[in-house]
Amino acid sequence: MSSIVVIGSVNIDIVARVSRLPAPGETVTGAELSRFPGGKGANQALAARRLGADVQLIARVGDDAAAEEALSLLREGGVDLSECHRIASATTGTALIAVAPSGENHIVVAPGANRMFVADDLQMPDADALICQLEVPVPVIVRAAEAFGGFFCVNLAPAAEIDVRVLQRADLVVVNETESSWYGDSLAACNGLVATTRGAGMATLERNGHLIAETRPPAVAAVDTTGAGDTFTAALTLALVEGRAPLEALKFACAAGAVATMTMGAQPSLPDRASVSEWL
Ligand code: RIB
């Protein structure tokens, strides 16, 4: 079984299902409210676990009741949480998410404890792969990238300034099309693979600007796209670490990401390997 360490965020997602996403300055009423465990790091950890990896999540949560709620599905799913520590007087990260009937969303994150992760406190375990995203401070990611010897994936989400050493070190960089435009030419610093997702459109895998593989996700009835990118990132990392060829790995990741849009909520929607295989 492949082993994966995820360093990243843990959030509680407060989700409002709306008839349409509001324009700036507009109020949309009549929403239905739900709460789900979320956070890009936590979602990627649970996605990798459900797809068959042995997973440890390294994260920071608050000293509040939301912390246990946010970690509940990870615990149930068998993710190693021994390096998920509470920070006194901090609140657990919270995401406010509006989801339209098309599955599209708007997300606002109050990072809370995620922002208080200190690089000097990082204990780097051994594993086949490490996955990071940008909801924890960049110095943590730099430290992890330098200390880790295995396959390193960074998901550049949400788009933010990143140290060029992280791009140079990464074996795999994952962006969606909005993030890809935001980073622009700076992605040329990447020495490894760059995967770009485009929602239901063509996903690509490139190295040094050369196309290695491309494929379209299967057409599914999407109800909530929250967590689809996290699932894609976890699935692609796992498939590459398992030694799958680039096109096969990309197809697997696209199918996993697509299946994750078919159920409401980030973590309840994360698929297991059998349900991904059905779509391949
Ligand atoms: O990628 C989806 C995640 O982004 C949500 O679960 C939310 O918590 C935000 O971090």
Image (cartoon, grey):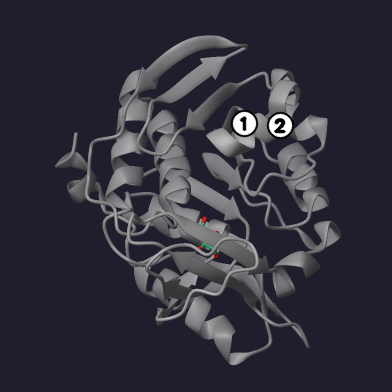
For label 1, count other residues whose C-alpha is less than 10 Å away and answer few (under 14), some (14-19) or many (20+): many
Q: In the rendered view, does 25 fall on the left or right side of 257?
A: right
Q: Quadrant of the C terminus?
A: top left
Residue underneath mark 2: 183
Q: Is residue 150 visible?
A: no
Q: Is residue 24 above or below residue 5?
A: below
In the structure shown, which secondary structural element does the residue marked by tag 1 occupy? helix
User: Is 263 or 90 nearer to us in this picture?
Assistant: 263
Q: In the rendered view, does 218 fall on the left or right side of 208?
A: left
Residue underneath mark 1: 180
Quadrant of the image occupied by residue 245: top left
User: Is 109 or 104 nearer to us in this picture?
Assistant: 104
Q: In the rendered view, does 233 fall on the left or right side of 249?
A: right
Q: Quadrant of the N terminus?
A: top left
The spot of residue 124 in percent (x, y) is 69, 52
In the structure shown, which secondary structural element does the residue marked by tag 2 occupy? helix
Residue drawn at (32%, 49%) of the image: 51
Q: Under 8 Å from ligand 1: the CB of mark 1?
A: no
Residue drawn at (51%, 28%) of the image: 195
**Amino acid on which disc 2 is placed:** Tyr
Quadrant of the image occupied by residue 24: bottom right
The spot of residue 174 in percent (x, y) is 55, 35
Do labels 2 and 1 touch, CB within 8 Å? yes
Residue drawn at (31%, 27%) of the image: 216
Most extreme residue toward the top is 210
Residue drawn at (64%, 41%) of the image: 156
Q: Is residue 95 above or below residue 88?
A: above
The spot of residue 122 in percent (x, y) is 76, 58
